[in-house]
Image (tube, helix red, strand yellow):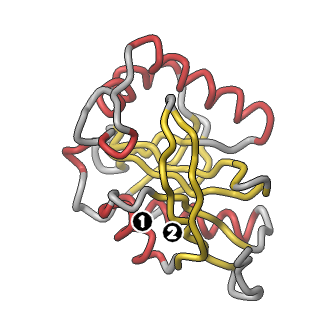
Amino acid sequence: MDLIITSERLILCKLTQDNFADLREMLQDSDVMYAWEHTFSDTQVQEWLERQFERYKKTSIGFWAAIEKETGKMVGQIGLAWTDIEGERVLELEYMLKKAHWHKGFAVEGGRACLNYAFDEMGVDSVYAPIRPENQRSIKVAETLGFEVCGEYVKHYNGKDMRHLIYVIASKSKPPHTG
């Protein structure tokens, strides 16, 4: 296990090929993937996993396996990734949990641990969370963590234009970018 971050109940570590079944469970669940407007085939799940491996090689960050300490089971994936929002490279907080682990505080706990890592270890000024307006569960997590809306944009994904709200949180020492 390539440990990245720990919190009270979670270990966040790099995904491995052994996480394929857990990823498939999430990425093929229409309730989990409703904001994406599609589920993934087995081939797409493997491609997702390989994209994380590439992120780790290039930047050392990406979606990480969120492992519950008490059970040793993967409850979801939570992490940080560099992304472009309207031409600006920003650090994004990402979280996705298996449906069985919704409403247990794991996304907030893992998200908070990632924010601490981003601000304290990576030294970034702000972290973003682009979220579809329909995704009320993700919005609730972001707002609980202290994110605020600073704009919106349209992301072209899977042949569709998808409106996203841009949430941002700044480190305690610097104001957020409001571009």
Residue sticking out furthest to the top: 43
- Quick one: quadrant of the N terminus? top right
Front residue of this view, candidates 9 and 31: 31
Q: Is residue 12 left or right of residue 116?
A: left
Q: Is residue 88 left or right of residue 11?
A: right
Residue 107 at x, y percent in the picture: 39, 59
Front residue of this view, candidates 71 and 15: 15
Determine crowd level at label 1: few under 14, some 14-19, many 20+ residues with C-alpha closer than 10 A.
some
Residue 145 at x, y percent in the picture: 46, 75
Residue 174 at x, y percent in the picture: 77, 86
Q: Tell me the CA gap for discs 1 and 2.
A: 5 Å
Where is mark 1, residue-wise? 109
Residue at image coords 39%, 28%: 23
Residues at circles 1 and 2 in contact by the CB criterion of under 8 Å: yes
Residue 115 at x, y percent in the picture: 60, 67
Where is mark 2, residue-wise? 112
Q: Taking 96 as reference, is 46 above or below it?
A: above
Residue at image coords 58%, 36%: 14
